[in-house]
Amino acid sequence: MTFSLATWNINSVRLREPIVLKLLQEQTPDVLCLQECKSPVDKIPTEGFAALGYTHMIARGQKGYNGVAILSRMPIEEVGSEDFAALGHARHIAGRLDNGVTIHNFYVPAGGDVPDRQVNEKFGQKLDYLTEMRDWFRAERPRKSILVGDLNIAPREDDVWNHKQLLKIVSHTPTEVAHLAETQDAGGWVDVTRQDIPDGPLFSWWSYRARDWSAADKGRRLDHVWATPDISNAAHSSRVLRDARGWEKPSDHAPVFACFDL
């Protein structure tokens, strides 16, 4: 069985329903994981998704911010959600497909603007969130699992447009990169995107502030697809749908795709 999966920080699923439908119609992933839905679960516009065959959804929602959802053409059973760092935020949902694969959908806190937890509470919350993710994966060693989402960290030098200029910018600081690496190692996670595309600059986010985001190309790879070692070799065809960043009323993130032969 081959299935395709996409992850996308949609920055309001209700406001951007038209481009979610466009993605589902044109790219037809079997599973679409959304972050920053900014909607209570009962307000997510599921009718249009269902009409395209995405009749299954599991989600956690909040009014106006955060929120994660998994849309699927295949049956998916919710198997939990975690509130790491006790923030009370809707930032994680996990589901299991009929083929036994568990999908974790995460929206890691952005961390504010100042990379110092002494003066910026949000940065401390981000590090605490990652630490608790790490400890959870150490205790609950995942198997046959995929982790996706906006992890809000660009770990590699070629995951940002300028490594030296961004070393003190939240999302690429050495402290954050180290925390993410510990989390990845704790679960034995394989970075599927970089397994498929090992070399060269690769971005999934471009700021709204840029007058011409594509020409400036000051991007970062904040959105990730990981898999446990027992299924990582089944992954292939990873890509970033850069064009979606230029769609009408776009998110500042582009969808990231992968396929799995399982």
Image (tube, rainbow, N blue to C red):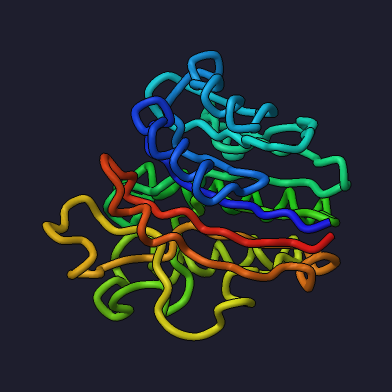
Q: Nearer the viewer, residue 11 or 80?
A: 11
Q: Nearer the viewer, residue 33 or 63?
A: 33
* Number of on-image labels: 0
Where is residue 229? Give x, y as percent.
80, 69
Q: Is residue 260 visible in this depiction of the protein?
A: yes
- In which quadrant of the rendered image does the C terminus lie? bottom right
**What residue is rendered at 56% in x and 29% in y?**
49
Tell me, yes or no, if residue 191 can be seen here. Answer: no
Q: Residue at x 21, y 61 (%)?
A: 213
Residue 196 place in picture, x, y as percent: 61, 76
Residue 198 occupies which quadrant of the picture? bottom right
Toward the bottom, the furthest residue is 199
Q: Horizontal and vertical percent for residue 254?
A: 41, 54
Image point 33% across, 54% down: which residue?
Answer: 245
- Compared with 141, 74 (above or below) is above
Q: Name the spot of residue 186 as percent of width and height, x first.
A: 73, 63
Q: Residue reaching furthest left?
A: 211
In this view, the residue in front, 216 or 249, is 249
Q: Quadrant of the N terminus?
A: bottom right
Identity of the residue drawn at 51% across and 42% down = 25
On the rendered structure, is 221 left or right of 78?
left
| Residue 195 to residue 256: above or below | below
